[in-house]
Image: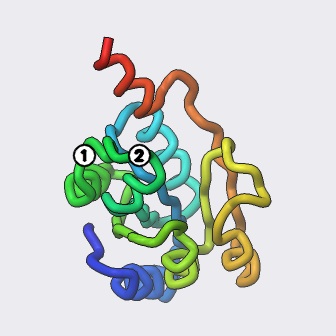
Amino acid sequence: MFLASRTDAAEWAARARAEGRRVVFTNGVFDLLHPGHVRYLQAARAEGDTMIVAINSDRSVSAIKGPTRPITPQHERAEVLGALRCVDAVVVFDEDTPFDIISAVQPDVLVKGADWAEDKIVGRDVVEARGGRVVRMPIEQGWSTTGIIQKTKL
């Protein structure tokens, strides 16, 4: 399911919690979906009962990764992610960090890749303040969008 706004995402998460489900949240670019992404998302989903994935807008991807990215536009990335069984909802965020969307959603579990230092995980304070937990998920080695792009240039 594609959620159009931060408000929609917050309302969706509140309904899930009211039904007794633990809400998992993760975020990222997810530009060229590969097995590393899928395995990460499946493992993240296993941390709770339902999962929302926030993806960076095209503008924010370009700001982070450079003018040649993203390869796949935000609505197409959202559609592909939303088609995965392990993903229950997808929302696009335009800010430089996911802090505002995490604050709105108030997830029970925040999942980030283990490549993020604990003290650098945006939204950690929000989640832990309400009794939630933060999980640093191992990254699948050998897979990266940047690596895939480099291979196509050979």
Nearest the eye: 122 or 51: 122
Question: What is the crowding at mark 2: few (fewer than 14 residues within 10 Å), some, or many (at least 20)?
Answer: few
Q: Furthest residue to the right? A: 119
**Residue 122: percent from left, percent from top:** 65, 66
Say few, some or many: other residues with alpha carbon within 10 Å of mark 1 (under 14 / 14 to 19 / 20 or more). some
Residue on which disc 1 sits: 72
Q: Amino acid at mark 1?
A: Thr
Which label is found at residue 135? none
| Residue with the most extreme top position | 154
Mark 2 and mark 1 residues within 8 Å of each other at the beta carbon: no
Question: What quarter of the picture does the C terminus occupy?
Answer: top left
Residue named by callout 2:
66
Residue at 24%, 46% (x, y): give it: 72
Could you tell whether 82 is left or right of 136 in the image?
left
Label 2's element? loop
Task: Report helix, strand or loop for mark 1.
Answer: loop
Q: Residue at x 41, y 51 (%)?
A: 29
- Please state the horizontal and vertical placement of residue 11, each as a whole percent of the image: 40, 88
Q: Is residue 112 left or right of residue 145?
A: right
Q: Measured along the vertical axis of the image, is residue 59 above or below residue 62?
A: below
Q: Position of residue 21 (x, y in %)?
A: 51, 75
CA distance separating discs 2 and 1: 14 Å
Residue type (three-letter) at the residue carrying disc 2? Gly
**Quadrant holding the N terminus:** bottom left
Residue 58 position by quadrant = bottom left
- Up-down: is 128 above or below 87? below
Q: Earlier in the sequence, mark 2 or mark 1?
A: 2
Q: Residue at x 54, y 67 (%)?
A: 97
